[in-house]
Image (spheres, rainbow, N blue to C red):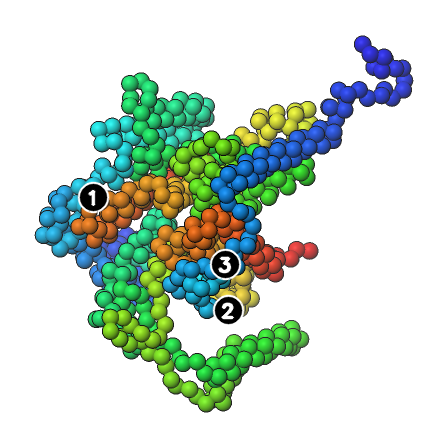
Amino acid sequence: MADNAKLPPLPTGTFSARAVTWSKKNLFDGWFNTLLTLGSIAFLVWLIPPLVNWGILNATLTPSIEGCAEVTGACWGFVNANLRLILFGTYPYDEQWRPLLAMIVLMGIICFSLGGVKYPSFRKAIIPMWVIGVPIIAILMWGGALGLTYVQNSYWGGLPLTLILSAIGIIFAFPLGLLLALGRQSTMPAIKTISVVYIEVIRGVPLITVLFMASVMFPLFLPDGVTIDKLLRAQIGIILFTAAYLAEVFRGGLQAVPRGQFEAGDSLGLSYWQSMRLIILPQALRLVIPPTVNSFISMLKDTTLVVIIGLFDFLGTVKLALRSDPAWTKYYVEGYAFASAIFFLICFSMAKYSAYLEKELRKGEQR
Amino acid sequence: MSKTQNAPGGVRSKTVVDYLNDENVRAILYQIIAIGLVILAGWYLVSNTLVNLERQNISTGYGFLDLEASFEISESMVQYSAQSSYATALLVGLLNTVKVSLLGIILCTIIGTIFGIARLSSNWIVRKLATVYVEIFRNIPVLLQLFFWYAVIPNAFPHPRDAFEPLPGVLLTSRGMYMPVPVADNAYTLMGIAAIIAFVAIFLIKKWAKKRQDETGQPFPVFLVGTGIFIGLVFIAYLIGGAPTDMDIPELKGFNIRGGTNVSPEFLAVLIGLTVYTSTYVAEVVRSGIQAVPHGQWEAADSLGIKRSVALRKVILPQSMRVAIPPLTNQYLNLTKNSSLAVAVGYPDLVSVSNTTMNQTGQAIEAISIFMSIYLGLSLLTSLFMNWFNKKMALVER
């Protein structure tokens, strides 16, 4: 057992002894690592205390410009004073419980869908949840039914708008992307060409060009007298854009299903759609759940681009609040920090969950 | 019952139903339907568009490109004024897009590689710091980051009157960064030519050295010799050109800074935002690339007696490159496409200039078709180049 002599001693003894062993191995292993450690500590000492002073100790929550002028730290009062504007945009003030409720319903369905994919018994309920949930959200947001007053969608804004644009975007892009992916895998040259051209063209251009197209060119495409408003046009642009990316995600899943599975379907005498529905897709879709969640995350981040074509999503309302009073304008760091924190919370937790799902769904293959 | 089905012995002739059940016939039928639908949809959209354009009295065509643009562009790499044509304006936009994308790609590769390796470091604190950097900046929308930098840069630095001077001649102000540039001289053209000659020479030496090593096994210090040749040749060209030392140094004149070259806050915001955002993705690509190389490769190099630094360069990195190239291509393309967000902070990139053109001329379809096809072209070029590079690096199996 000569090899064992070389192994580091097992961490035993008191806590401090173990701490010394650990830090020798993880922090001060050689001159280069020691240098790195000291440099990193210096960096943290330079960064953290001023940040804490600015963000917490010297900050204020007082929702007034005067209150903010008194402190040297962050003016969270800007967020506090404009919270409703930032969260809901220009939605009528007295009706803002409706977008709040819609947002809660939407988040609930998203969480259920994300959580449900793990359990086969829940999976069946996901599609019905969306079929019921989307009309509920529509009624809450638009109103005009059940005694709710009608609210034009040009007044929609803030976090609900961001969530709606990305969630509806991915839901409608799902079937379209699936068709495109199947088309790309098809042996029929014409259908394959159409799918490939669509996917590659959309993936080759930035989302902002698609949004410009939606906002400027869509009105020209429609017959005289038919108009669709800006929000819907942006939503259609987002759906068309996401579909191309989802198609590539699905293609990855389809390609990962072994060839023998296709042949098994054929040898059972199943038709193309039967073998797709019963054999291929259940396996392929299970594989693409994590990358689909990642697509949703990028979608959520990308919907901020609708600011450029003049819609007030969550980022747009933060800018709106900053402009609402010239005295607030200088508190842009606080405004952007708040928006960043919300985006970070949503995206980071979903990304972590997606990574967890990936591990979880692969458990069956591990021996 | 039809006669054909009872025909004794012989091959029965096919009915229409049989044809419809034939897989090949069906395939053709489906394709005809699909093409028909696409043509129908296209025709519907085009005819609507033509009617609408006629109703709004918009003439179609690319004739407007020769007209005078009559708007200023704040920064341009070629001669441009308000009297130039729309075509020139679009070229200026394209060059600005290429400039910020290329610089962004170079910077994000360097920063991303550093953070990717740092995430695998054996040093706990370095590993955690790199993870925090990656997780924070990739989970915040890139547009939000652009807005942030665009708000910070003009506010973080002083007014030109009391500019901050970190290096002699380099001025940091709320209107961007000013740097000295050498006054144009023939010597610089000469130096450029010398650099090209040096590159050709290095290429030839590298070929020769590889041949010699293949034949005799003797290595040749290509890197050292090449660097020497490059520096030597360029320096000789500088001396031959008369060693000019005149610099155009930025100075405060009146209320503004004259001279030197200016890096605008818009450009800096776009560059920093895109670089930071994309570097987090590059870091993940680099990390997974290195992790994808089996540990046995290190051990194989050890057992052959190869030094660890050489093993990293000649054994590990080439293999991790193979895994990393396709996702890296995607990130470069993403950065190029995301540079279109420059329109939001007023950096005159292709989309921003096209947008102004579109608003002035009303030629929406033409302007959008131009920038869409340029982006498609750029994407295509990048993927063609990376495919070629990928093939070069790919594993050649028996």
Q: Dot 2, crowdedness within 10 Å: few (<14), some or many (≥20)?
A: few
- Compare marks 3 and 2 and give the one earlier in the sequence: 3
The numbered dot on residue A17 is none
* Secondary structure type for disc 3: loop
Does residue B141 appear left or right of residue B37 in this picture?
left
Residue A109 x, y percent position in the rendering: 37, 28
List the residue tagged with mark 3: B67
Q: Amino acid at mark 2?
A: Val
Q: Nearer the viewer, residue B349 or B356?
A: B356
List the residue tagged with mark 1: A79
Q: Which part of the image, by quadrant, shows the C terminus of chain B?
A: bottom right
Same chain for the residues under marks 3 and 2 in the image: yes
Residue B327 showing in the rendered view? no
List the residue tagged with mark 2: B310
In the image, what residue occupies the spot 13% across and 47% down?
A: A65
Q: Amino acid at mark 1?
A: Val
Q: Which part of the image, by quadrant, shows the N terminus of chain B?
A: top right
Q: Nearer the viewer, residue B235 or A35?
A: B235
